[in-house]
Image (tube, grey):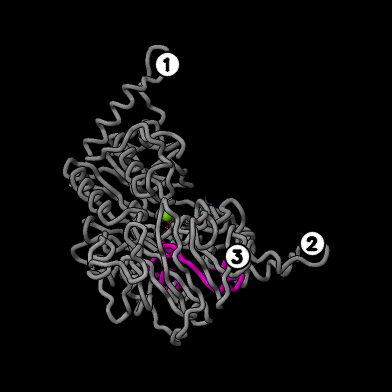
Amino acid sequence: MEEVLLAENIYKSFPGVQAVDQVSLRLYRGEILALVGENGAGKSTLTQILGGAQKPDSGRIFLEGREVSFNSPQDAIQAGISMVFQELSLVSSLSVAENLFANRQPVGRLDNIRWRKLYRDTREFLSRFDQHLDPRQPVKQLSMGQQQILEILKAISTGPKVLILDEPTSSLTESEVAYLFKNLRKLQAEGMSIIYITHKLSEIFQIASRVVVMRDGRYITDRKVSEVSESDLVATMVGRQITNLYGERSRPAHAEDYFRVENLTRKSSFEGITFGLKRGEILGLAGLVGAGRTEVARAIVGIDPRDSGRITLDGEEIHIARPQDAIARKIVYLTEDRKGQGLFLSMPVRDNLIAPSLKRFTRRFDFLNAEAIDHFAHEMVARYSIATPSIDKKLLNLSGGNQQKCMIAMWMGIEPKVVIFDEPTRGVDVGARAEIYQKLREISSQGAGIILISSDLPELIGMCDRILVMHQGRIQGEVQREDFSEELILSYAAGLNGAARAGQVQ
Ligand SMILES: Nc1ncnc2c1ncn2[C@@H]1O[C@H](COP(=O)(O)OP(=O)(O)OP(=O)(O)O)[C@@H](O)[C@H]1O
Ligand SMILES: [Mg+2]
């Protein structure tokens, strides 16, 4: 097999962490290589070095036998390595075409952008990949999945020899994932080499031929996919066996609804949403991306307005017009978009952890009690096993799973009564997942009701007592734990299985 890329003894440290510790990696022509490891294992850092976004402290990179060194992603693209980063980098106010051809728009003699040609080229390129987006459409109007696909197509459009995808499917629907895999196989057959980072281990068995495992910045092993099992991989990734990922409930949920949503409607997104929640219950909200699950959550907590509907807590109607009203009632929403809305990424871990509980730390005359704050932050870091060298570290520099744990810790600090989790384990490794599930169990056993929005069916089935399935803005079906099956949930999600629930039909 012909070697396309060789990375030799790559080393990179940040204050307090050896992110990549003497890792070597080979990539062959036309190969899809999976790169896996727990949150913070160094996958993104290593590949960002290959993709020109970071400089290694030491080590060498060879592309087709020639040594290369990059000062920017642009340099790497020129040399033939194109990378899709873990975080989306499209400019949301610009159009599809402007994003796709950023920095390389067709220009006329006077350096003016040739818009007609830009739109035509865009349409032509997208249609080669069976995409029929309007080139003029602003990116912000696209779904997260469409944005992700566009981002990947943008990387492909530079015609790279090596394509690096860092968790490309974390916001894709199942059909979008199938679409992506079909195209990756096509590119692979044409000789493109691909490094594929994922936390969804089942994907490895569908798409990759070889898998490299990293742990704590180090290279652990390199195996043929046909020769490993999923549980082997998990054990090498986390260095221990994980049994019973979802855990068990420690006490039954109460019998009565204490929180009720009645006829909640926001005409543009959903209609007639009615359900109850019991203390200690974990209620799943399933549905395809776009079914309106996140929109319902946002309306409940007052981020988006609603057209009608009633919410009661402990038998009393409550009025939530703004997010602060929900927080005051101890109803919290942990967003799926932790980068955009959930966290203060450029601020230290400490400041994030205490943000919603600030009131507790104000002494008379509004002075903050610094010592108590540090104490609280340290306790949260320990209790939620957040891997960070210190509470002063900016959140931005923590791995995805650790950012997620921070978000959970920060909201649990206010001791909520109702917790809505939106995709809590997206981009989170198996070890951290097990910990997050255990936290959900703890929160519910302390008497809070949990609404779990997830696109991961095994997760819903493993965690929930009951699942509501949404389809096109309505609750299409309700499934009790004893009847859980992927088939039944998927058929409701697809709008099948007949009538909506009683009381939902308008
Ligand atoms: N810019 C940075 N400054 C400081 N520390 C960083 C920076 N980038 C990454 N780190 C640290 O380096 C280590 C490796 O992080 P990296 O993002 O490469 O992990 P990962 O394997 O991609 O994790 P995940 O699966 O969560 O995406 C982590 O401990 C992280 O906190
Ligand atoms: Mg990463």
- Tell me the SS state at disc 1: loop
Residue mark closest to the camera, 3 vs 2: 3
**Is-magenta flag for residue 461?**
no
Q: Which residue is mark 3?
A: 327
Quadrant for residue 150, please give it. top left
Name the disc covering residue 111, or none.
1
Taking 230 as reference, is 185 above or below it? above
Mark-to-mark CA distance, 1 and 2? 57 Å
Check if residue 424 falls in the magenta segment. yes
The part of the chain drawn in magenta is 409-436
In the shown orientation, is residue 225 left or right of residue 357?
left
Query: Marks 2 and 1: in contact by CB < 8 Å?
Result: no
Residue drawn at x 38%, y 44% is: 142
Task: Say above or below: 401 vs 135.
Answer: below
Mark 1 or mark 3, which is nearer the start of the sequence? 1
Q: CA distance from mark 3 to mark 1?
A: 52 Å
